[in-house]
Amino acid sequence: MIPRRRFLQAAAATTVAASLPATAAQAATTTVPAEGTLTDLGPASVASPLGNAEFVGGILYAGSRGLSPNVVGAYDLAKDSVTAHFDIPTGIGVWAMCKTGTDVYVGTHSKSDLYKLDTLTGTVTKVASYPDHFIWTLAASPDGKIYLGTSEPGKVKEYDPATGASRDLGEAAPGEAYVRSIQADDTHVYAGVGANAHLIAIDRATGEKKELLPAALADRDWVSSMHISDTHIAGGMNSLAELVVMEKADPAGYKVVKATAPGEKYIVSVLIHDGYVYFAGRPSGTFYRYSLASGELEVLGVPYFEAATHRILAHEGRIYGVQDNAVFVYDPATGALEYRNLVQRGFNAAPEEPMSVHSDGKIVYVGGKSGADIHDLATGKVTRLGIPGEPKTMITVKGTTYLGVYTQAALYSHRAGDAEPKLLARAGNDQDRPRDLAYDARTGLIVMPSQPEPGEMNGALSFYSPRTGSFVTQRPVVERQTVYSVVTRHGTAFLGTLTQEGLGLPPVTTTARLAAYDLAKRKLLWELEPVAGARYISALALGPITLYGMTNTGVVFEFDLLRKKVARTLKVGAKGGDLFVLGRVAYCTDGDKVYKIDLVSFTAKPIVEGLAGQWFGGEPKLALDPSRRALYGVKGRNLVRIDINGRR
């Protein structure tokens, strides 16, 4: 772990107390802050994740994601340093970039804007805005038009720099949610589609669409990455880690190339160059090369274990791969593979949108892209714990912290002070996104619910035994839903669900469910719908004989475990977040306020307002300190401690 910064030490209070009489000193040191008192602990998670890049001359222009504002950094190869940054003022990230001439185009998401970076003058101009949720991918045609792949629904759009006009070419494959890859030549635009795989050629003049993906591959999930040459198309398919290669003149004469690293699932980036197809896989992080002439597949190496490669580019005889905060460089002439950390070369690191927060009482973990920041509560020191993924949920059991990590629904463990976490297992079973963690003392199991991969049905529950090391996944648990939240007691897991299965798959159910599950028998005991119209149950917490839950709509419900029915409901916040029960009170958040609920009168009041927490994905989180005297959340993008008393 690398130290990032140090906060000022809280020595002043000790100095003052030492100069006072004993009774006064005791009073000074035992003063309890008022409930709702905020202590700012600085940026919650500082990172520099990249989403894409383009070369103009000898400079690599790399776009960030999750920062505020996002930037395009100029990495000068000759100077081996990042020499300039250009702000991209809107959107929460940059996934899409392309170039035409000396202009670099940048596509953002949430909101979806298109920017032009004039690399000669250094000026950034917003040239278009779109109503789509994401701009996932950009490509320039030989005559300088810009093509965009968007989502929800999966559309293709054209921007003409000469006129400033945009043209909507419609849904690439009607009914599909995502266009995740795009390329263009003189006559056609090629769109890679998901969550059900399609490879669509769109005639640029007429708009006519033609399916190029062979019928034998129609059951694949995505064509999520793609590149074209004058003669060939190569597309990366999920979730079997396959590359489809075809000639433009004869798409029916295709070949499927299977990535060979154990457990490989995704082909995340593709480049056709000099007679080869270069591509990168996940979760292994392996870099491959396929010969168009001989059909030979080579493994070139693993630039950084399990890292995602967002773009592969060729420049002056070398191949460059863009990863979260770095680039790797492959020299085909020598076979040398070099790794260059761009943060160490001057790329801005800045507060990102945090994804999770957890405290073991001595440190606070804040999950983000490619790791977690660890805040030492005694010293104020903050270090970065690198993880090849995104920690979505965390729990500490007997001195070990367990982290549920996206992608691949992975479970890691970490002990305070260790430089690296340990990968314990992956859920498999087409699972992708951990949603919660809970520990059951009776069975000794850690329970991890997960959401399936895009386009897949049915979430799962995974069970890990720290004592034996066994890891088992059951899928499905609640049919045609994802388990979003979990709490356990005496061998029973109580589950709150989400109606969404894999992203891009339309929900087939309308209301979130509450369920009970026997951990010993691995059997669902019962399920019901506690709150009409709720899309998900964001959190669950147990009282002595009652179960409390919070829905995405901000409704808190009290469930009678003996009678198995909802006893009371209360509209608390604007949306759902985490929920904790402490005796006769509970605390919860909607991201802007922290509420205290009197569980006797079943009334709520805010104890903190104006947090405006900038949580990734808009899913507000909250952590309870083991002392039960404090909560941890974020104000904006800063970590804050919130004092509580746990009393009515």
Image (cartoon, rainbow, N blue to C red):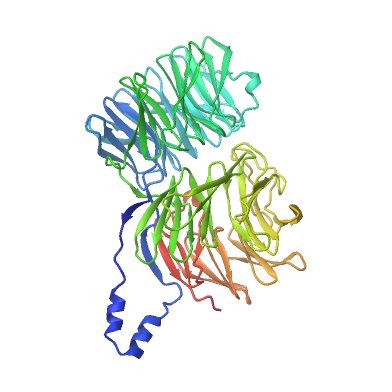
Position of 231 with respect to 237 (left or right) is left
Query: x, y percentage for residue 500?
Result: 63, 45
Query: Horizontal and vertical percent for residue 562?
Result: 76, 68
Count every numbered label the image shows and give the total.
0
Residue at 33% over, 47% down: 349
In x, y percent, where is residue 44? Answer: 40, 56
Q: Position of residue 26 (x, y in %)?
A: 37, 86
Residue 272 found in image quarter: top left
Please tell me in which quadrant of the rendered image residue 61 appears: top left
Residue ID at (53%, 75%) = 646
Left or right: 133, with 336 as reference point: right
- Between 580 and 259, the one nearer to me in the picture: 259
Q: What residue is rendered at 59% in x and 33% in y?
A: 195
Q: Is residue 448 left or right of residue 68?
A: right
Evaluate whether residue 536 shows in this view.
no
Residue situated in front as seen by the camera: 191 or 405:
405
Quadrant occupied by the C terminus: bottom right
Asked if 28 appears above or below 359 in the picture, the reply is below
Check the image and name the residue furthest to the top. Answer: 249
Q: Is residue 275 above or below residue 52?
A: above
Can residue 618 be seen here? The reply is yes
